[in-house]
Image (cartoon, rainbow, N blue to C red):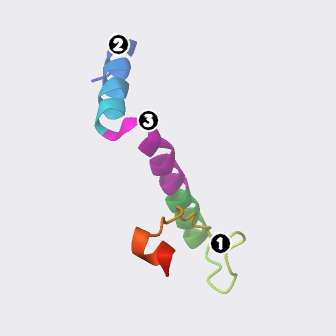
Amino acid sequence: MWDSPMHLLIVAIVILVLFGGRKIPELMRGLGEGVRGFKEGMSGNPNQPPANPPVQASAPVEKSSEEKKA
């Protein structure tokens, strides 16, 4: 299936086009958290709380012109 490095390059370009440069780090972060959670679940320590709870960043929300006046 992956006979040459050219196949990997084509797949990487397609992924970049589909998801864009900004979404890829978010996807990889989510994948890493999922794998980490899976490994913690497989370790068999259900009583142990997670070491680092995931922190979700929120984007700043702009107020509408009516809310700014009030």
Write the residue at 58% across / 63% down: 57
Q: Is residue 34 above or below residue 8?
A: below
What segment is highlighted magenta in the picture? 19-32
In space, the residues marked 3 and 1 are separated at their CA atoms by 26 Å
Q: Nearer the viewer, mark 2 or mark 3?
A: 3
User: From the image, which quarter does the N terminus lie in?
Assistant: top left
Q: Nearer the viewer, residue 68 or 31?
A: 68
Q: Is residue 21 magenta?
A: yes
Question: How many marks can you see?
Answer: 3
Q: Nearer the viewer, mark 3 or mark 1?
A: 3
Q: Earlier in the sequence, mark 2 or mark 3?
A: 2
Mark 1–mark 2 contact, CB under 8 Å?
Answer: no
Q: Secondary structure at mark 1?
A: loop
Amino acid at circle 3 = Gly
Q: Quadrant of residue 58?
A: bottom right
Amino acid at circle 2 = Met
Residue 4 is at least partly visible in this image: no
Disc ID at residue 21: 3
Residue that badge 1 annotates? 53
Write the residue at 48% across / 53% down: 31
In space, the residues marked 1 and 2 are separated at their CA atoms by 39 Å
Q: Is residue 28 magenta?
A: yes
Q: Is residue 18 above or below residue 43?
A: above
Mark 3–mark 1 contact, CB under 8 Å?
Answer: no
Q: Quadrant of residue 41?
A: bottom right
Residue furthest out toward the front: 69
Q: Nearer the viewer, mark 1 or mark 2?
A: 1
Disc ID at residue 6: 2
Please give left or right for residue 48 compared with residue 60 in the image: right
